[in-house]
Image (cartoon, rainbow, N blue to C red):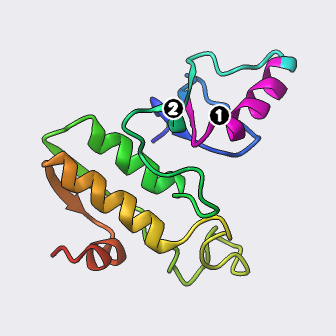
């Protein structure tokens, strides 16, 4: 958890870690301005970066007003690697009573650019195409996907 290989973000504040991870942006349009700002500060991601909208086949339709969350995209990328087993935790579909971010109960539910249906469609397709054993530790996600 303290030394990830990849960090998925659309946030302008890139994660600073002792060992820099590859930074994955959902789209080039979202990631390029962030990369330019960091390059101008002489702090680009040293391990590299990727734009998920450039993959073929695509992980999602990024042209719609509602796009998948980074969590759903993480599952899609992991499943595309065709592991024998994938363990999914921490995706509660934004139903946690404490809100979207711990300590900020005003931030309950999805941001306007995300919704559960989009995330579920991306995750379901990824798992169906993976053919791997899926261990889902998040009760809300397991129920929404109809998996026991």
**Label 2 Cα neighbours within 10 Å, binned few <14 / some 14-19 / many ≥20:** few
Q: Position of residue 56 (x, y in %)?
A: 39, 33
Q: Compared to 31, does 100 lie above or below?
A: below
Label ID, residue 54: 2
Q: Which residue is mark 1?
A: 28
Badge 2 or badge 1: first in the primary sequence? 1
Q: Quick check: 126 left or right of 2?
A: left
Q: Position of residue 109 (x, y in %)?
A: 60, 77
Q: Quick check: 14 left or right of 49?
A: right
Give the structural element (helix, strand or loop) at label 1. Answer: helix
Q: Name the residue furthest right.
A: 40
Q: Compared to 136, does 35 lie above or below?
A: above
Q: Compared to 8, does 147 lie above or below?
A: below
**In which quadrant will I find the N terminus?**
top left
Q: Quick check: 84 left or right of 27?
A: left
Nearest to the observer: residue 84 or residue 57: 57
Nearest to the observer: residue 52 or residue 24: 52
């Amino acid at each position: 958890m303290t030394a990830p290989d990849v960090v998925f973000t659309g946030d302008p504040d890139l994660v600073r870690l002792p060992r820099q991870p590859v930074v994955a942006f959902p789209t080039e349009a979202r990631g390029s301005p962030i990369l330019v700002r960091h390059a101008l500060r002489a702090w680009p991601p040293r391990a590299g970066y990727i734009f998920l909208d450039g993959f073929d086949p695509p992980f999602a339709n990024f042209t719609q007003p509602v796009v998948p969350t980074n969590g759903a995209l993480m599952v899609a990328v992991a499943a595309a690697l065709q592991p024998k087993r994938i363990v999914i935790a921490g995706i509660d579909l934004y139903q946690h009573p404490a809100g979207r971010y711990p300590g900020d109960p005003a931030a309950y539910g999805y941001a306007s650019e995300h919704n559960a249906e989009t995330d579920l469609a991306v995750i379901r397709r990824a798992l169906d195409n993976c053919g791997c054993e899926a261990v889902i530790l998040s009760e809300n996600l397991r129920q929404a996907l109809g998996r026991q």
